[in-house]
Each structure stands twice: as structure tokens, then as C-alpha cells.
Amino acid sequence: MSETSPPPSAARGSFYYRLGEWVVRFRRSILLTSVIFTLVMGHQMATKLVINNSTDIYIQSHDGLLERLHELRETFGDERVLLLVAEGDVFSQDYLRQLKKLETSIRGFAFETTDKQSRSVFGRAPDSATTTEQHATSDSPDLVAPGKDDFAEFEDFEENGSADAWGQESGGSIFEDIISILNVRQTRFVDGALKVEGLLESWPTDAELPALKEKVLNDPTLVGQVISAAGQHSVMVIRTTELNEVDARRLTVAMLELMAEHERPGFRLHLAGFSTMLATLAQVLKKQQLTIAGLSGGGLILLLFLFFRHPYGVLGPMMVVGMSVCWTLGTMAVLGVPMTSENQIIACFLQVVGIGDTVHVQSVYRTLRRDGLENNEAICQALKSTGAPVVFTTLTTAAGLSSFISASTPPIRDSGTFGAFGVLLALALSLTVAPAVLAYNTKSLLGVKPIAEQARDRLDDLLDWCNRLSSGADGRSSRARAPWVVALGALLGVSCVYSASKIQVGQDVISWFPEELPIRKAFVAIDEHVGGAANLELLVRAEPGKTIKSRELLLGLEKLEAHALAYRDPLTGMKVVENVTSVVDVIRESSRAINGNQQSHYRVPDTQRGVTDLMTLFENSGPSELKRLMTVDASKSLMTLRVRWLDATAYGPLVEHMNAGITEHMDGLAEVHMTGSVTSNLTIARALLGDLVTSASIALCVITLFMVVLFRDLKLGLVSMLPNLLPAISVLGFMGAIGLRLDVSNLLVSSIVLGIAVDDTIHFLHQFKAHYAKHGHVDNAIAHAFDHAGRALLSTSAILLTGFVVFYIGTLQNIRVFGGLICLSIIVALVADLIFAPAILRVVFRNRVADESPVDSPAKPQLESTHVPA
Amino acid sequence: MKPRSAQLAIASLVVACGLHAVDAKALNPNTKDANAIAKAVDAQDGGDKTTSLMTMTLKDASGRKRVRKLQQRSLKFHGGTKTIIFFESPADVRNTALLSVDYDDGNKTDDQWLYLPSLHKSTRISSSEKSGSFLGTDLTYADMTKPDISDYNYKIVKQSAKVGGEDCWVLESRAKTKKLAEETGYLKSHQWISKSKLIPLQVKSWITEGKKLKYMKFGDVKKVDGVWTPFKLSVRTMRAGKVESMTTLVFNRIRHNQDSVTDSDFTERRLEKGL
């Protein structure tokens, strides 16, 4: 097959030709410099790149949401509790003893956080207290600024750390509190005295167990909170200090090890909770990514070797991909930008662009070599020939990615910024490092046979068949079939748009895990038996002039609690809110206890003084419990709704229901804000669709503009968008048709799809335009495009398919879906460019010359120059 | 060990620190004998029949605070100490009152009554937690206890340390039994003992639960009725280098050995009568 012809002398003056000359001349320096820089950036990447899958990072730009979350954590502790479920006969001595042992082990568990540094006793560690620093209220300077209070003179304290000090003075358990059936607070009237103590502070005898069981299972404040209705599951709610991603992962691993030591027959343990889920996700992702990256890389190498039949043909593309990944992620590390679920797919972009660019350059290069050009000249000519389309395809991809800079969620913005940056790096490396590698290839034709030995193969037959689908059987310009093929493509497109309109947005991380994985089982167990695995937090701020102790306000909270418990899921009719805890519980419990345990007194007292008195009682008897529910000045309070785990969007109606309740019951009494992981996830899910629509619209406009500029032809530019859009629409249509939800893990698939499609289209249409501009014959120009770009399109598509098909072996469903969708899009993009694009061209363009010249036959390569600059 | 002193007796805290300085000169400032220092401090007789006004301020990590003004009086009796505390302000808690009887016998459960005006009757409170918070502050009931020195091991951590310009020994105390350590909630404590006054000027305690650290500092020490008496106590609880909460007690009009303090001041009837 002919890819090119000997260069006209004028061509030597082109930019890309001169670039080729420069690369050949400085090949050693280029390779050496790039390898050294790769090592440096690789080191940065390995040592400084932070993984952050926290949802907090997604809500930074949503007004007040993150601030409220920090306010919640600073005031009442981290809401991302660990939920440890113990399955067995709760009311048996064996179970309770085992639970006690487990609790003791956890309390004594030595866990050192990674950010622990030597801290001043009275000052704050520079890194550890960032949150406090950022969100400390202005009226608290004496507590945060060392040297301004009575303790400034306590210099000696810092010198007395000994072996049993709490870890160099900076210690402190990471566990804020651990609540289980063993110690859940009980306020009771016993033997003429008020008693506030843990439920099992007095250990029950065998004889007392049945009575205990009856009492506990009939207590609505305990069932669904620390124990299941059947008494076969109890949950330990473990609240930790705010941990970073690494520590959360380490803690999850350590907790699972600890649990394994305590697990016995009749005492089965599960660990759930939001932070556990994220930690498990990060752990599985990390493990899986290594496998996928290894297999994907191996597959790429194998395919590249099959296509180019020589190490030089493999080395260049793999170096471009590897280096661009290293440089991009290294830059992120240097700039302190974390890796998230979103921008982890930057590597995929770079793989697409790096492979696409270098395969095109190498394909032309080997043809030139086959045609007899000397190695260095072939490199220069290959760059001159492919430079413009390669630059344009990459710029188009970068422009498409840049559209995500408009996204409302920071990780998606980062993906846009660094994705665009990375593909530009990949472009630079494709035009320098890959040719520099080829400069050392003096003998190999990289798999292409000399002209004399060349014969048609199956790929040629396939390409010929694609061409003839929209032309006459003779391959000439009887265009009768073209409109039908276009109509078929249009039908496909319309069907996909219709299906895409049904696409739903979701965010259900747990559904990504296989059903047999412990984390998923744990969530199911908690959801089914103990109230639910998620919390919706309500931050209550008393209106000026009022405090949480206001009876009116407490009655409002009581009504709001009833309002929450009355909620049913509109689709399933299922009860979603299983349990509510708030300061109202404390008041009601104390009231009941102080009135001789009479259930009729389980209510807010009738007078304000009665409320104040009970609050005073509890301030004195259970201050640590009260601290979790109300601030010392009674200005803020926390109401926690234990809810079932649902897809994030399914919480939308609940949030609306609660908003209505807040307006109805709390208006004029307190400002109530919903916060926590439930609202964060809902906000993220809602923002995703907006981000997708906005970014896709911008990308569409920008890419269309690029196409028009590239082809310097409005008609061709607009026509090119049809095969570009079809793969993206097909993917969204497919998702809509089979009910796959759009979430953070697949939001950017359409962008990758667009990048792949644009690359293919530009290369194909570039060749068409070059021939059509010179000769004015549509069929011949299409045949020329098939001849010069067809094989490269097949090659890149096959290589990319190999790279992405391995995603399907992943454990996580979202990764498998991601790989599957990319593979689907690669196939659709190929079909769009090899079948629909020629048909569209035949319908839209007309011959400018008589329809008599022979079609370029793939079997008879033409040696005339076809490399018209774009 | 002596049983903990009056559970709710702020006075006892003051008494624990407010010691007659008469024996200070009897102890060699260069002594290496930690037990001798502990004995000398313990041997001091604190005040009795004490009255005071107290302003109690509790702050959380964000600086939000709760302020209470209290009136208290205490009386030693054979076998223990009685203390009564009336809430003076803010207005919504005025006349809430606490009466406690703290027995010297550690095996005997201390008595405590709470008067809540809305109920018009006093209610007995049952509490067995020495490590529990005192009035919701950073102080625990164990902090209110004058310890029996025979239940503790002492050692000198530092022979000389300055606190507010005063030369101090830094003494480490550690419970001899695990049970006692669990009861008090402390692994160990360091006390800065003034060599001239033989009273602690500051204390650092290692809290077992949550592995926290607690710092107490006694300030504005004056001699009242012949007793060295701190008029201010600041307490700070810290974890992982961060302040969790802080309590400040400021005393006014402290008087010891007041004849007006009689047994009749420490009855349920008096509790219900209010201020």
C-alpha cells in the first residue's frame, strides 16, 4: 500500500520537516533528557501524589456545603463513623463477653496517624490543625493561639515525654467515642436515685438476660440504633477524629485484622460506614489498577509488536505513553493536586493520544521506508506528512478536555486541566521522542513488506468492503447506496439520542463492589437489620436570642423527628429513616427517669424551667454525651437520621421532605441545615449531569470550530462532526437503553470517546481533503483516504481495544463498565469513520471533474504526492 | 488511699492546694526523697468551714462558652466532707442546687442530691464514676479527691523547675493498683510543687480514656485565714496536640474557718430553700 511519495523539495522547508531534522540531529540528547526528566517526575509521582477519594473534594465549590460539613465536624466530630456489626445471639454471655473483649481491644488500639508530628503542647501542629485554623470562629483566639493564655508559661511540660507518654505528647486516641449495646447511655430511676450509666455497666447474670432482652428490644431508642429488632445483630458505632485518606485506609485494614482475631462461630463481624467504604474502594482500586495497568500495558506491547514487528515499533509508543503519564501525574504531585476517582482516567486519555499519534507517525514512516527512503529522510517526511493532523487531533482532544474546566466539581475541573496538559505533553513526545527512537532504526521496515512482496491482505479486503458499502459494487461513483447508509447512521443516531434522554444520574459506590465482597455484605447487613448504613445530619443553629434549651425549639425538633420517621420512599414505599437521635432524646429520657421511669413522662416537660432543669441535670451527669448533641453555649445542636443506604439521587425526595419539615416546624426557631455524606453525595450526583451537559456543549462548539479551522472548509468541518458525535451519542444511548447510570466513574467516558472519534475522523478526512482538493473526485479521494489512513485507523483501534478490554476483568463493576463503554465507543468510532463518513462525504460532496478517472485501488498503490498540508 | 473528698466540693479542691506553709522550711529544697515531699504536702491541713463565690467558665475548642456563678460552702465532719452548691446565675438556672456528702471510707458510696426547682423536690443522684466530669467541666470527681499517698508511687522527675518564678519540684505520682488507676481515669500525674509553699502550682495528668492530656494551673495564690489559697484554677484538656476544652474557675470571697457554716446548712431542706 502506498502511504506517500518522495518529497518535493519545497516540502523540506516545512516546520514539521525541520522538526524531524532537529530530532534526528539531537536524538541522543532528546532521549537522555526525557528519560532523566521522567525519572525526576516519576519520583515526584511516587512520593508526593496524594489519592483523595473523599466526597469533600467534590463539593468545594458548592455554596456553604463544605463549610457546613467542617462546622459539623469541628463542633460534633466526624460524621463518617465506622459501623461494626456483630452478628449472633446478642443476649448470650458468650456474645456479650466477646463484644466486650472486642471493644476493649479497640479502645486500647494503638494507631498512629501519618500526619503526626512533634507538636507543641500548647501550639498546634502546623499540618494537623489546618481545618481548625481555616474554620475557627473569630471569638476563640485564646484557645488556638499559643502564648496568649494562662498556659504560656508551661514550658516544662514539653520536656517530660516518657516511654508511656501518649506518643510524644502529640498522641491521643483517634477514637472520639465508641457506642455499643455495652455502654449506650441510659438515664434511669433506680432504688430511689437517678442513675446515668452505660446499659451493661452492671454485667447481667444468666438469669437477668431474658429480662434485659425484653427491655432492650422494646426500647425504640435502642432498636435500629445499636441493636436489631430480632436481637441477632448489634452495631458498634465508632467515631474517629478526622482522618486523611491514607489513615482511613490504614485504619480499615487494621480494624479488619483486629476483627479477624475476635471473630468466632456465633460472633460474626462486619465493618461498614462511609469512610470504610471509601477506604475499601481505594484499596481495591489500587490493587486492581496495578493488574489492569500491567495487562493493558502487556496487551499494548503485544499488539504494537504484531503491527510493527520490531522493538523500535513498540518502544516509541510505549515511551510516549509512559512518559506523558509520568510527567502529567508528576506535575499534579508537585502542584499538590490529588488523584481522585475522576482524574485517575487521565492515564487513559494519554494512552489514547500517545498511541494514536505515534501509530500514525510510525505507519507513514514505515511506508516511506518501504518506498525506499533513507531512515532520517523517512522520519522527516513522516513528521511532515502526519504532523499537521497529529497536532490538530491532539489540540482538538485538549480543547475538548478543556471544556471540563467549566465544571462545578473540582476533580472534574482538574481532569480537564491536567488531561489537556497531558495530551499536549503526549503530542510533544510523539513528535520528538518517538521519532528520536526511530532514528536508531536503520534496518527494520517495522512490519511492512517491500513493494515487490506486497499483496492484498484481509485488512485491505475489509477496508475495500467498507468503502463499497456506500458506493457501487465496482467502487465507483454510483452513489445509490450512500443515502441509505447515511439514513441508517441517522436512524442509529436518533435512536441513541432517544435512549440517551432516558439516562439517569446516580452515585451508589456500594453497588460497584461485587456482592460477595465483605464490605457489601456489611452494608446489606446493617441496612437489613440495624437501621441503615448512612446518616443524614441536621445542623441546628438557634435563632439569635434563643438557645437549644428553648422548650419551643425542642418541641419543634420533636415534630421534625416525627416528620422524618414518617417518610416513605416514593417509589418503593419503604421506610427510609429508621432512627433519629437528638438532644430531645436526652430531655425525654431524663424526664422519664426523674419521674420514676413513667413512660408517660417520656416527653418534653410542660414548662421552660422544667426543660432547663433537665438540661442542667444532664450537663452535670452526662456532659460527654451532651457534647455530641449540643454545644456548651447551647447555640447549636445536632440531629442525626439513621437512613437506609440508597443511590445518592434517591435521597432527593427525602431531602425535599425534610426541607418541608424544617420550614413547617422550625421556622423562626432555628436555622437548620442538612449536611453529611448523604447530602454531599446527592449534591455531587446532581452536579454531575449539569457538568456533563455544560462541558459537552462547550466541547462540541470548540471541536466543531477546530474542525472548520483544520479543514479550512465549513462544510467539511460540519460534516466531520457527524462521525465524531455518533460514538459519544451511542455510548450515552447504550447507557440509557440498558439502565446504566451516569456517575463519577463514567462521566468522562463521553470525552474520551470524543477524543478517540476525533482522532480517527481527522486522519481520515485529512487524507480525503488532501486528495479532493487536488483532484476534485469524491470517490477517488475516499479511496485515497482508505488507502492512507484506513490501516492506521484499524491499527490504533485494535491497539486501544486491547488496552481497554482488560478493564473488564476488574473487580469493581464501575471499572468494568468503564472499559466496556470505551471498547464500544472505539468500535462505533471505527464504524463511523470507515462506513458512515464515506457515505456522508458521497452525499455531501460532488465531483469537480468528470467521473472517469480510475479509483485508486488499494491493490495498486499510487506513488503520487498526497500529503497536502492542512 | 483516702476516699475521694467531697464530690462536689470546690472547697476541697482549694483545700487540697491551700495548705498551711508552716512546714515548708522543714523540708530540704534539695531533697531527693519524693515520698517525703508527698508526705509534707499531704500533712498540711487545709481550711474547714469554707465559703466562697465561684465563677465557672467552660469553653469548647471553638471558643464557645458557658458561664455559671455559684455559691458554695463546705464542712468537714468525722468521716467525710459535706458540700452544698447553689447556682446563682444565669437566671434560668438560679436556685438549682447540689448537696454532696463525701465519705472518707472509700468503700462507702458518696451521696449526692440535686434540687431542680421545677420539680420542687430534691432527687438523689447515683454515681460511681470517679473519672466522670464534675459539673460538666474539665475537672473530674477524682480531681476533687485528696489522695491517700500510700496508694501511690512517687518519684522526682525534675529537681528544680520554675513556675511563675517559683522554684518547684516536679513530682510524678502513679497509682499502685490498676483498679485505682481505672477509678481515677489517670495513668499518672506530674505535679509542680512549690518548694516555698508546699502546694502544687500546676499539674499534668495522663488520661487513659482517649489518651488525652490534662493540664491544671493554679493561679493568684494568696494566704487566706492562714491558708495558701489559689483564687484561680485553669484546666485544659488536650488531645493530639489540640485543645478539646477548657475550664476556668475564679473564686471570690473565699473564707475559711467560718463559724456561720454549720451542719444545718447541709440538709435537703436547705437545698430546697434556695438562695
Image (cartoon, rainbow, N blue to C red):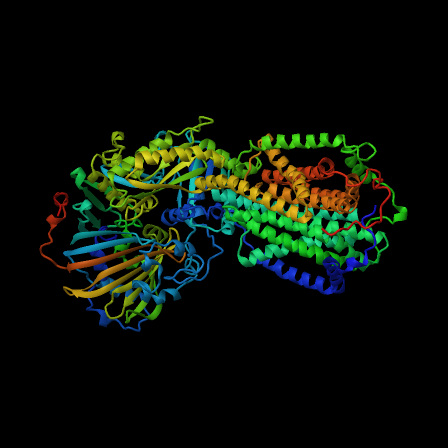
Q: Is residue A150 left or right of residue A841?
A: left
Query: Could you say where residue A365 lies in the image, as x and y percent from the top left?
Result: 79, 53
The answer to whether residue A226 is seen in the rendering is no
Query: Could you say where residue A842 lies in the image, as x and y percent from the top left?
Result: 74, 36
Q: How many marks?
A: 0
Q: Is residue B1 left or right of residue A831?
A: left
Residue nearer the viewer, A371 or A156: A371
Q: Is residue A496 left or right of residue B115?
A: right
| Quadrant hosting residue A328 | bottom right
Residue nearer the viewer, A470 or B189: A470
Outermost top residue: A573
Query: Could you say where residue A148 lies in the image, as x and y percent from the top left?
Result: 31, 64
Q: Quadrant of the N terminus of chain A?
A: top right
Residue A694 vertical placement versus B104 (above, below): above
| Quadrant hosting residue A424 | bottom right
Residue A21 vertical placement versus A266 (above, below): below
**Rendered residue at 76%/62% (across/down):** A21
Outermost left residue: B260
Query: Could you say where residue A277 lies in the image, as x and y percent from the top left?
Result: 51, 42
**Rendered residue at 30%/62% (across/down):** A149
Residue nearer the viewer, B156 or A634: A634
Q: Is residue A468 left or right of residue A502?
A: right
Residue nearer the viewer, A773 or A704: A773
| Quadrant hosting residue B40 | bottom left
The answer to whether residue A418 is seen in the rendering is yes
